[in-house]
Image: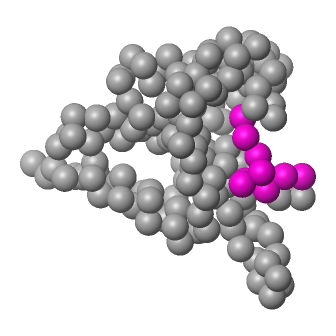
Amino acid sequence: MADHSKRIGKADESAKELIIEILGHNVTYGFDVDSIYYIRKEDKWILIELLKCDHKTVTPKNSHPRRYWNKNWRKFAALWKLRNGLDAELYLVNYEDEGHANMQGRKERQFLVINVKKMDPKENGGITSEKSLECDYSGFRDWFLDINSRAGK
């Protein structure tokens, strides 16, 4: 029996489509977690939630969950509860799809990786301690591939 997962070939949105179909016009009280990794060698869980930024409004390095805490605090509180239940590390990753033009006019994609250390998971709460890493696509790719690689060992 192989000790590895299959390769991701394409995005499978069918589960989300099924949920949307079932909910119809009802609001949802759930959410998906973008990536969950178990690092066996370290006996550690890692939760990653990707937070898309619209670069026309705010760039990833200038965005933060505190900007829209009142709108999404339940999601962050649930992630925090999951993080605590698994004794995991929680990473919130601000990213942009299209990127922004740099001084030479080339499009670059920014990422802000927020390692949430402490949170007050209430409506008027927020992230109270964090460690952040600003990076470009290459830096984020290296960070993500490192986690994936550690989970595969």
The one of 80 and 18 positioned closer to us in this rendering: 80
Magenta stretch holds residue 94:
no
The one of 53 and 32 positioned closer to us in this rendering: 53
In the displayed structure image, the side of residue 54 where residue 91 appears, left or right: left
Q: Which x, y percent locates residue 92?
A: 58, 40
Give the total number of marks visible in the rendering. 0
Seen as rendered, the residue at the extreme bottom is 104
Seen as rendered, the residue at the extreme left is 1
Q: Which x, y percent locates residue 108?
A: 71, 73
- Give the answer, above or below, for where 87 lies relative to 115: above
Query: What's the residue at 53%, 43% (across, down)?
Result: 131
In the displayed structure image, the side of residue 54 where residue 87 appears, left or right: left
Q: Is residue 34 visible?
A: no
Query: What's the residue at 44%, 66% (across, down)?
Result: 142
Query: What's the residue at 42%, 34% (across, down)?
Result: 89
Query: What's the residue at 21%, 40% (across, down)?
Result: 42
Q: Quadrant of residue 127?
A: top right
In the displayed structure image, the side of residue 102 where residue 134 appears, left or right: left
- Give the answer, above or below, for where 112 lies relative to 117: below
The one of 61 and 13 positioned closer to us in this rendering: 61
Seen as rendered, the residue at the extreme right is 57
By what rule are the colours in the image chosen? one colour
Q: Which x, y percent locates residue 133?
A: 56, 54
Q: Quadrant of residue 146?
A: bottom left
Residue stretch rendered in magenta on the structure: 57-65
- Give the answer, above or below, for where 131 lies relative to 21: below
The one of 3 and 78 positioned closer to us in this rendering: 78
Q: Is residue 116 visible?
A: yes
Q: Which x, y percent locates residue 5?
A: 28, 51
